[in-house]
Image (cartoon, helix red, strand yellow):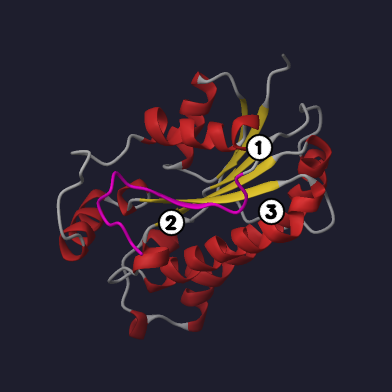
Amino acid sequence: MARRHALIVGAGDPADAVAVGLEARGWAVTRMADDTLEWTDDTVDSRLPGRDPIDLVVHARYPAPARRRSALVDLSDEDWYRMADEPLEAAVRLARSAHADLAATSGTMVFLVPLMASAGGDGFAPMATAAEGIRIMAKSLAKTWGHDGIRVHALTLDPSAFLAEADAAGMAEANSLHDPPLGRVPDLAAEVAPIVDALAGDDFASLVGASLVVDGGLWMPG
């Protein structure tokens, strides 16, 4: 069986840990950091010459400005662009560039989004805005790309996967109503990466446009 190839986009966690987990499950992984994506009509493969065909693209790109706590009233238009608009635009460019490559392999695209996307987050309005836009885009892409053989999903993760420890702890204390039923937040490499792996496999081929919350049951948003 040919080794499957994943492209993971984003610096730091959750991208780093998910890459480790996928490699442990036999994936060949190519990484791209938070460099601004300026692709237009080029395909992912043309930007990564010599690589194997791409079976999976994982987006977890939230640059440092978007991960910083900020007061909305203090942000300039330029600040908002860097923290909210640019991350969403980059996700759109990545999806557009990956389409031809994923169609050629009947591949899968998975967007990792912070829970602020659906639950909100005090001090993180820009990141929540970008993340919710990305999450909804994933569902729309799933509807339009299904006939091309491409599956698209979003995995919503606990804020601790994206934020500094103090920020994530404060958000959990302010918003959660109980301790995680599992007694912990899922480990990114050991427990989240296998879900990404499964979504890219044949056993879940009938699952389309899933928006799954993988946080150990801490928030349980409706």
Label 2 vs label 3, nearer the camera: 3
Q: Earlier in the sequence, mark 3 or mark 1?
A: 1
Q: Earlier in the sequence, mark 1 or mark 2?
A: 1
Tell me the tag on residue 121.
none
Tell me the tag on residue 56.
1
The residue depicted at 47 percent of the width and 75 percent of the height is: 79
Q: Which residues are magenta?
A: 207-222
Tell me the tag on residue 64.
2
Amino acid type at circle 2 is Ala
Report the side of 109 relative to 98 (left or right). left
Pointer 2: residues within 10 angstroms few (<14), some, or many (20+)? some
Determine the CA span between mark 1 and mark 2.
25 Å
Is residue 90 in view from this perspective? no
Callout 1 secondary element: strand
Amino acid type at circle 1 is Leu
Determine the CA span between mark 2 and mark 3.
18 Å
The residue depicted at 24 percent of the width and 58 percent of the height is: 167
Callout 3 secondary element: helix
Determine the CA span between mark 3 and mark 1.
13 Å
What residue is shown with label 3? 94
Q: Earlier in the sequence, mark 2 or mark 3?
A: 2
Amino acid type at circle 3 is Leu
Where is residue 68? Give x, y as percent: 35, 62
